[in-house]
């Protein structure tokens, strides 16, 4: 099978052109190919497919084979893939995802996509829809106890997938492999959740690390950066226009007060093409 390795701020996925390639069991392939020693190595697998309602469609699988309904870093790479390879030559692109059709504005340099601005849609704050087993009035900065005795204050937001944002004083000092899994799988999240640890360093600056549902710590998460920006506004810690600094680079997020839409802007990068036996 032909594949392409790409990354958005260090959040790397294996991309397969579903216009040409047929993958019988993508979930199983995601587990096998994502392995960084026995496979190609990635945070997961993304299929680029034809769509009846948009320019193309994406399907994303985490490294454990589970499905993610939306991927902010992945969708920018999908845009770069279809534009740079001439599949869809438009600089305003519509991509179908499991959480609806998203509109993307491409920034092209020397004929290739350098960065992409995505309308990520409106954040979902209804606990039943996220889903999180909290009541409606307990969504912002609420205490959660973990089985190992940690206490975190979380703000829950869905950006098409479930996120819990936790503000801390020293994001770099955290031992994520120890604290991430028990929050990802906490009983309050019936479908597990992506967990963001954030440190607000100014009205327009947030530093963030992420423990992703199904993939563990990644260098960045686009939907997570958006959830983090929304949570920063809801808790009164930052303005609607923030740069989220991640281990893999920066993402710019703007939560529009007029439309309630969240815009995310960041780079998309090609790494290499290859073929693999599956
Ligand atoms: N890295 C992705 C999100 C993957 C989400 C996935 N881990 C899930 O919801 O299960 C992003 O850039 O938005």
Image (spheres, rainbow, N blue to C red):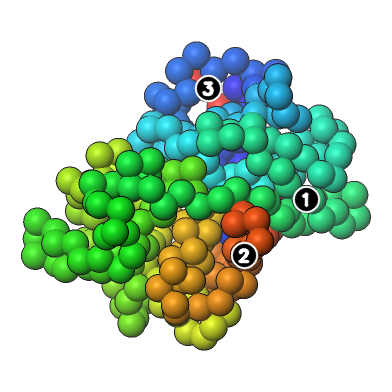
Secondary element at image label 1: strand
N-terminal of the two: label 2 or label 3? 2
Residue 224 is labelled as none
Q: Nearer the viewer, residue 119 or 107?
A: 119
Residue under label 3, please give it.
Answer: 277
Left/right of residue 87 with respect to residue 260 in the rendered view: right
N-terminal of the two: label 3 or label 1? 1
Secondary element at image label 3: loop
Residue under label 2, please give it.
Answer: 257
Identity of the residue furthest to the bottom in this view: 202
Residue under label 1, please give it.
Answer: 105
Is 45 rendered above or below residue 111? Answer: above
Disc 2 to disc 3, C-alpha distance: 49 Å
Task: Look at discs 1 and 2 and give the one toward the viewer.
Answer: 2
Q: Position of residue 99 (x, y in %)?
A: 53, 36
**Residue 105 visible in the current orientation:** yes
Disc 3 to disc 1, C-alpha distance: 35 Å
């Amino acid at each position: 099978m032909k594949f392409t390795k790409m990354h958005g701020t260090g959040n790397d996925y294996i991309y397969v052109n579903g216009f040409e390639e047929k993958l019988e069991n993508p979930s199983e392939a995601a587990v096998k190919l994502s392995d960084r020693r026995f496979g190609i190595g990635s945070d997961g697998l993304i299929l680029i497919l034809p769509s009846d309602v948009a320019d193309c469609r994406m399907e994303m699988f985490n490294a454990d084979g589970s499905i993610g309904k939306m991927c902010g870093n992945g969708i920018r790479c999908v845009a770069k893939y279809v534009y740079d390879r001439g599949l869809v030559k438009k600089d305003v692109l519509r991509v179908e995802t499991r959480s609806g059709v998203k509109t993307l504005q491409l920034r092209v340099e020397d004929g290739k996509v350098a960065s992409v601005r995505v309308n990520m849609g409106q954040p979902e704050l209804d606990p039943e829809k996220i889903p999180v087993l909290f009541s409606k009035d307990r969504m912002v900065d609420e205490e959660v106890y973990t089985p190992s005795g940690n206490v975190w204050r979380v703000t829950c937001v869905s950006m098409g997938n479930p996120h819990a944002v936790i503000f801390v004083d020293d994001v770099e000092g955290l031992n994520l492999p120890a604290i991430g899994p028990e929050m990802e799988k906490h009983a309050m999240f019936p479908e597990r959740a992506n967990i963001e640890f954030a440190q607000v360093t100014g009205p327009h600056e947030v530093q963030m690390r992420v423990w992703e549902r199904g993939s563990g710590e990644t260098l960045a998460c686009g939907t997570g950066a958006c959830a983090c920006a929304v949570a920063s506004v809801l808790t009164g810690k930052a303005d609607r226009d923030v740069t989220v600094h991640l281990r893999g680079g920066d993402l710019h997020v703007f939560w529009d007060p007029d439309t309630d839409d969240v815009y995310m802007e960041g780079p998309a990068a090609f790494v290499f093409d290859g073929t693999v036996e599956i």
